[in-house]
Image (cartoon, rainbow, N blue to C red):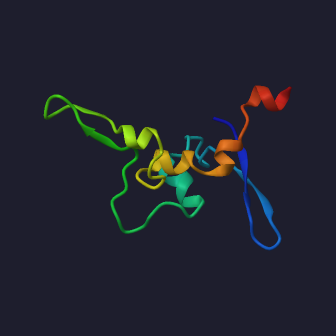
Amino acid sequence: MRDGYFIKYDDPPRVYPQSMMLLDGRLKGLRKFLQEHSLWPENQRFLTQCSILGSTPSERKPNPACRNAVNASCCACTLLSSQLHFQAQKCQLQETL
């Protein structure tokens, strides 16, 4: 993971740097990242990734509706992947070239 940026469309719009590391050198988690963008729903249960029951009671598998982003706020992974600045971010190789 590497640092990036995001744009807040205030008046005037501004570009903010986005660090992917905590001050102690550990990677930020999905919750921390979404909290910085004011996207994490407070005071309610919010899954990291949706899942459905598998063929046995103890088995869980990815929810197809989640993978297809039918509901952009169903879980943290889908919420993040639906953000325009996240979709527009190029990989480091593309930016270097």
Question: Which image quadrant: the C terminus?
Answer: top right
Residue at the image position 13 percent from the left and 34 percent from the top: 57
Residue 50 left/right relative to 67: left
Residue 1 left/right relative to 11: left
Residue at the image position 80 percent from the left and 65 percent from the top: 13
Outermost right residue: 97
Residue 70 left/right relative to 22: left
Outermost left residue: 57
Q: In the picture shown, does residue 59 fall above or below 71?
A: above
Q: Position of residue 70 (x, y in %)?
A: 45, 48
- How many numbered dots are placed on residues in this image? 0
Q: Position of residue 5 (x, y in %)?
A: 73, 49
The answer to whether residue 84 of the structure is visible from this angle is yes
Outermost bottom residue: 11
Residue at the image position 51 percent from the left and 51 percent from the top: 79
Question: Which image quadrant: the N terminus?
Answer: top right
Residue 25 image-quadrant placement: top right
The answer to whether residue 19 of the structure is visible from this angle is no
Q: In the picture shown, does residue 8 fall above or below 47?
A: below
Q: Position of residue 86 (x, y in %)?
A: 65, 45
Q: Quick one: 96 or 65, which is closer to the camera? A: 65
